[in-house]
Amino acid sequence: MRHSVTGALILVLISLSPRVRGGAPSLATQVHTIFQAKCVECHAADLPRPKGKFGYVLDLARVAANPKMIAPGKPAKSELYQMLVHDEMPDPKGNSPPLTLAEKEVVKAWIEAGSPAYVTPETPTIVPPLTFRQRLVRCLGQFHPPTTHFPIALLIVALPAELLWMLTRKDSWKDIVRFCIMLGAAGAVIAATLGWCDAAFSNYRGASSQLLEWHRWFGTATAVWAVVVATLLEFACRNGSSLRWRYYFRLALVIGVVLVNVAGYLGASLIYGLHHFTW
């Protein structure tokens, strides 16, 4: 009899212990995995401009503490769950598919359980500290976004300036074209170089990783083409009596403007999503 009572007490204690009560940690881990797969494209902490100014989707404690998103124990009153259940998140215009029915049930159970934040830790990965060279490359890469604005503006402005020179034949417009092209080509090379530095330390995943590749190579092609445009312009200026080089330059300039716009669109898509232009 004594052994039976003792056994019963042990079972009660086990049932009340954090380990069992902690079906919750396993639940939090599942939610973390779902958010990692479906939500970081728009709401990762490393994004410069996460959508909705919500860039901490993997910080479950912070998500659960936001009353605008989570009403603990009440999925029906939790905006986050309602957006997931109605397939409003992930963004239908993005690259991440909506949550499956099973995934939605996991998120619902997580909220009903009080939105626990403990995630079962994985085996830690030992990351060696960055060398001075790596830190320098990473630091330089941070200047990529602001430097892109100069070649974009200068190379695009050169096209209407060239058209105005064709119409008016004023040397002032011709000088403006040359200034924009030379400075724009130099700026494009600098921006593309810094872009490679920046990409070396990026952690885009899935579709965003593929988008980064497209942006990187289009940006590189734009920089190379800008140098070609500048070279053709120099030939045109040195052979002013021959219109052939000027025609070559104009054709190259139009192609260059197209490349600039494509590379810029892809770069913006890394921040705002692939379909950020809508009617």
Image: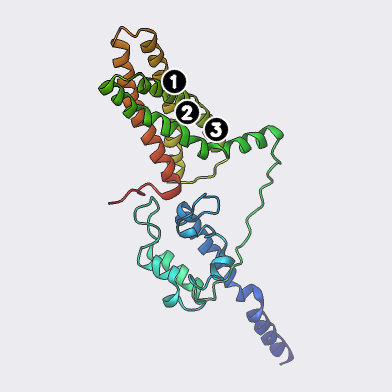
Residue 114 point in image, percent of width and height: 54, 76
- The residue located at (38%, 46%) in the rendering is 274
Q: Are marks 1 and 2 in contact (CB under 8 Å)?
A: yes
Q: Look at label 1 and name its amino acid.
A: Val
* Secondary element type, mark 2: helix
> Mark 2 — residue?
188
Q: Is residue 167 left or right of residue 85?
A: left
Report the residue marked by disc 1. Answer: 227
Residue drawn at 47 percent across, 25 percent down: 183
Q: CA distance from mark 1 to mark 2?
A: 9 Å
How far, Cα to Cα, is label 3 from label 1? 17 Å
> Mark number for residue 73?
none
Residue drawn at x 38%, y 57% is: 91
Q: Earlier in the sequence, mark 2 or mark 3?
A: 2
- Front position among marks 3 and 1: 1
Residue 194 image label: 3
Separation (CA) of disc 2 from disc 3? 10 Å
Mark before the other along the chain sequence, 1 or 2 = 2
* 10 Å crowding of disc 1: few (<14), some (14-19), many (20+): some
Q: Quadrant of residue 76?
A: bottom left
Task: Give whichever of 112, 80 is nearer the camera.
Answer: 80
